[in-house]
Amino acid sequence: MKPSSSPAAPAGSDELARAGSGNAAPPETIAARIYPFGDSALVCEAPAPATLACQQRIWALAQAVRAWPDVVEIVPGMNNLTIVFDPLSADLEARAVDLAAAWERAVGVAAPTREIEIGVRYGGEDGPDLRAVAEHAGLTVEEVVRRHSSAEYVVFFVGFQPGFAYLGGLDPSLHMPRRAVPRVAVPAGSVGIGGSQTGIYPAASPGGWQLIGRTPLPLFDPSRERPTLLEPGDRVRFTVLEIVQ
C-alpha cells in the first residue's frame, strides 16, 4: 500500500471515531477523523492545511502505534496516517478507539534529520514551465529561481512513486495550481511545483506539476542500502547549476 496525499473513505463507510474538536485549532487540539480503509486498515486524518507541526504529530503517532502487536504496516501520508492490521487478530472498532486516544496523546516529534543539497538546471527543456510560473507570480525568471533555491524545505512524506518526496516550505509567492492537462511523460529528475509544494520526479511518469527544472541526481535506486535519497524529516536545499532562458 502506498502513501496517499489524502486517502478518501470508502463509499458508504461510517466514521468510527473523532479525536479533538474544531477546524482551525493549534496542533495540540487539532481535530482528526478516523475511518476504516477496507476491512483491515484505519486512517487517521487531520484537516488541511498541511503544516510541519501536523506532520510531526503524524510521525509521533506512527511511532506510538508501531508497538501495537497487531499492526502489519504503517503508511504516513500528507496530514494522515494509514495503519494496516492483521485481519485475523485485530478488532478494528476497538483499535479505532485506541487510535483516537493515541492521537490525543501524540506530541509532535522531529524525524531524524539529514541536510541534502540538490543541484538543479532551471528552465529550457529541463524546466518548460518556468516562465509560466514567473508570469503567474508576477516575477522575473531569475527571481523565481532565487526564491526557489534560497528556501529550506522539509520532506513531509514520500509517496506517489518510490522516492517521490513532497517538500514543504515553498515560498507562498511561487504557489501555483497543477496543469489543467497533465503531461503524458515527465522525465526523471524533473523538479516541479504543485499547489503549495515542490517535489522531484524520481522516475519518468505522467504528471501534472509545473516543471521548472531538472536534477541529474538519482532519487531512487533499489540497489542502494537506502533506496530513496529523501526520507520524511530530511531538510533539502536546491542549488543552481544553470538557468536557461
Image (spheres, helix red, strand yellow):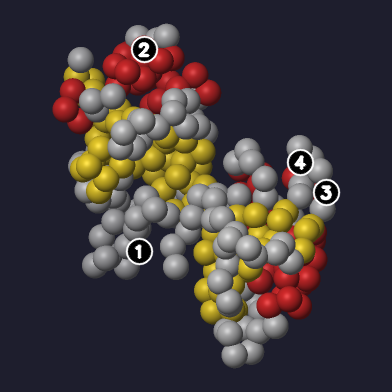
Disc 3/disc 4 C-alpha distance (Å): 7 Å
Which residue matches tag 4? 23
Please state if 125 lies on the left or on the right of 28 as rendered.
Answer: left
Tell me the element at label 3.
loop
Name which residue type carries label 3.
Ser
Going from the N terminus, do you reach mark 1 or mark 4 first? 4
Quick check: can you spot residue 167? yes
- Dot 1, crowdedness within 10 Å: few (<14), some or many (≥20)? few
Going from the N terminus, do you reach mark 2 or mark 3 first? 3
Tell me the element at label 1.
loop
Nearer-the-camera pick, 190 or 111: 190
Disc 1/disc 3 C-alpha distance (Å): 39 Å
Disc 2/disc 4 C-alpha distance (Å): 34 Å
Which residue matches tag 1? 226
Going from the N terminus, do you reach mark 1 or mark 3 first? 3
Tell me the element at label 2.
helix
